[in-house]
Image: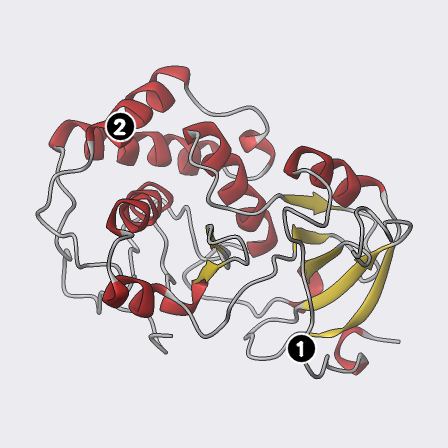
Amino acid sequence: MSPDERPSTTGRVSGWRPDSGPTLEEAVELLASRELTIEGRLPWSSNLTYLVTLEGTEGAAAGSGPVQAVYKPHQGEQSLWDFPDGLFRREAAAHVLSEALGWGVIPPTIVREDAPFGPGSLQLFIESDYEQHYFTLLEEGGREDELKVFCAFDIVANNADRKSGHVLYASDGRLWGIDHGLCFHEQHKLRTVIWDFADEEVPQLLVADLRRFVAQGVPAGMEELLSEAEAEAMLDRAAQLADIGYFPEPLGDRPPYPWPLV
């Protein structure tokens, strides 16, 4: 069966929760080693995106089902004039960046070569409240420090597609970021809904993390996911944000927001 013939998932699907699944460290090993079964296509994605089950992961904790993941195959990507081929590698690079910064805002994500429809990214599927997203979380208040982490991350990653719905509110209250295929371009491409902190100081804890990250150089494994020029541009953006110490305002004449906003 070809990728576009697979049925879409219907109804509510449940994802990983910290009380009923592997640790995040174990999740990376499971993503890399377990056989995948495609359950169906996930809706509302411009590229082919599938929910898959990692075989042999049933009963990881009391009352839990099998561990599931989001699979984005290379052959299901639409060609873009302004981004190089292979967006799935950027999904994995976002996780590498998040871990190298010590921020832990991207679910475990790897490149899987032996997936059902060929090479692609594989990301742990997180149980979330999809009624919540960046706009609702900002409006409710009290989570500004966490949201500033996403703001800083997107600047370093040069995220060209941070929609409000790309910030997930997990079942344990933790926030996660998803959909990072349009990141890490050498040229300025920042398009995001997170402009509310423009001209505010970057928290000193984040500045310290940025300086440490720059001093350590390109993270291990990143060279397989990005070009040398893209990796160096990433380090330059991190250094510049740390040195300036303020979140920027929109630059240039490009629309600074993605579409749709949510």
Name which residue type carries label 1. Answer: Arg
As rendered, which of 116 and 38 lies closer to the eye? Answer: 38
| Left or right: 178 as drawn, with respect to 30 | left
Q: Hey, which quadrant is residue 87 in on the image? A: bottom right
What secondary structure is found at the residue carrying circle 1?
Answer: loop
According to the picture, the residue beneath numbered tag 2 turns out to be 205
Separation of residues labelled 2 and 1 (CA atoms): 38 Å
Residue at the farthest front position: 62
Residue at 38 percent across and 63 percent down: it is 161
Picture coordinates of residue 150, whole percent (x, y) = 34, 48
Mark 2 is surrounded, within 10 Å at the Cα level, by few (under 14), some (14 to 19) or many (20 or more) other residues, namely: few
Mark 1 is surrounded, within 10 Å at the Cα level, by few (under 14), some (14 to 19) or many (20 or more) other residues, namely: few
Q: Hey, which quadrant is residue 73 in on the image? A: bottom right
Residue at 52 percent across and 57 percent down: it is 170
Residue at 47 percent across and 28 percent down: it is 100
- The N terminus, quarter of image: bottom right
